[in-house]
Image: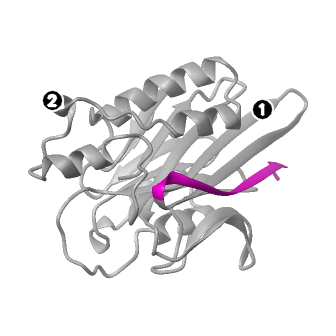
Amino acid sequence: MCLVLFAYDPQSAHPLVVAANRDEFYARPAESAHFWDDAPDVLAGRDLSAGGTWLGVSRAGRFATVTNFAEEGPSEAPLSRGRLPERFLAGRDDAHHFAHHLQGSRYRGFNLLLWDGRTLAYTSNRGHSQDLEPGVYGLANAELGATWPKVLRGREALRQAVAGGAHPDTLLELLADRHVPPDADLPRRGRPLELERRVAPCFIAGQDYGTRASTAVVFERRPGRATRVRFAEQAYGPGGEPGARVNHEFELN
C-alpha cells in the first residue's frame, strides 16, 4: 500500500517535490538508496527479489517511481514492475515517449510516474497515460485521482510543507503520519474491515508488513547555478522502528 505525494510546478524554484512511503513485507530483501555500480548516475534503492527499484533519481535530472495496484492477480508476471523505473532512469527516452509507448500488458497492475526535467508523465496499465499539469497530487495503489483518505490527508500535508520551503526533514515527518481514518471513509474493495484499518494510515507500522522506507526528493533551481537535488531516505523495521537514514545532495550534470 505505497504512497507517493508530489508537488509539480515547473516554473518555481522547486519544480518537483516528492514524499513517498514504500510499504512492503519486511522479509523481502532490498538495498537502501545508493548510487549503483552498474549505473553510476542512478540513485535508488534496489529490490533484491525481483530486481529493479521502486523510486529513484539520476544525475541527469530524471525521476521515476512505481506503485502496484491493489487487486487480485496472478502470482507471476513476465516482467517485474521494478524494472520500469530502472529502465527510465538509466535511459534517454523523454517522459512522454516512455509513458505513451510502454507495453503495459507485460506487467501486473502498476502506476508509473516519470520526470525528465521538462515533462512529468503518468501512466498505468489499468488506465491511461497523461502529461500532468502543475499541482499537488497523491498516488497510492489505485488510479491517479482516487480519493483514499491517506491520499487526501497526505496531499494537504504536502501542500503545507511546500509552502514552508520543502525541507526533506519536513517531508519525512509528514510521511510518518499514523492517523487511522474513520471506518466510513475507508476504501470499499471487498476486503476485511480490519485489513483496511491496518493499511489506511500514511505510515503502516506492522510486524510482518509495513512502511519499509520513507523518501524525500527535492529538485531545487538556483539562479546562475546548476539544479540541486536533495534526497533523504529513512528506513524502518517491524513495528515502525527507525533504521538507517541515507542523505544525498548533488548537482545535476
Q: Amino acid at mark 1?
A: Arg
Q: Is residue 251 visible?
A: no
Which residue is at a point 76% across and 56% down the rendered structure image? 59
In the image, 193 versus 125, the foreground residue is: 193
Circles 1 and 2: CB atoms closer than 8 Å = no
Extreme left residue here?
Answer: 190
Q: Which mark is residue 184?
A: 2
Residue position for label 1 = 221
| Residue sitting farthest toward the right | 224
| Labels 1 and 2: the sequence-earlier one | 2
Identify the residue at image location x=52%, y=41%: 120
Q: From the viewer's perspective, is 233 left or right of 185?
A: right
Q: Could you tell whether 106 is left or right of 247 in the image? A: left
Q: Secondary structure at mark 1?
A: strand
**For residue 219, above or below residue 251:** above
Q: Range of the magenta residues? A: 239-253
Residue 125 lies in magenta, yes or no?
A: no
User: Residue 95, image x and y in percent?
Assistant: 52, 51
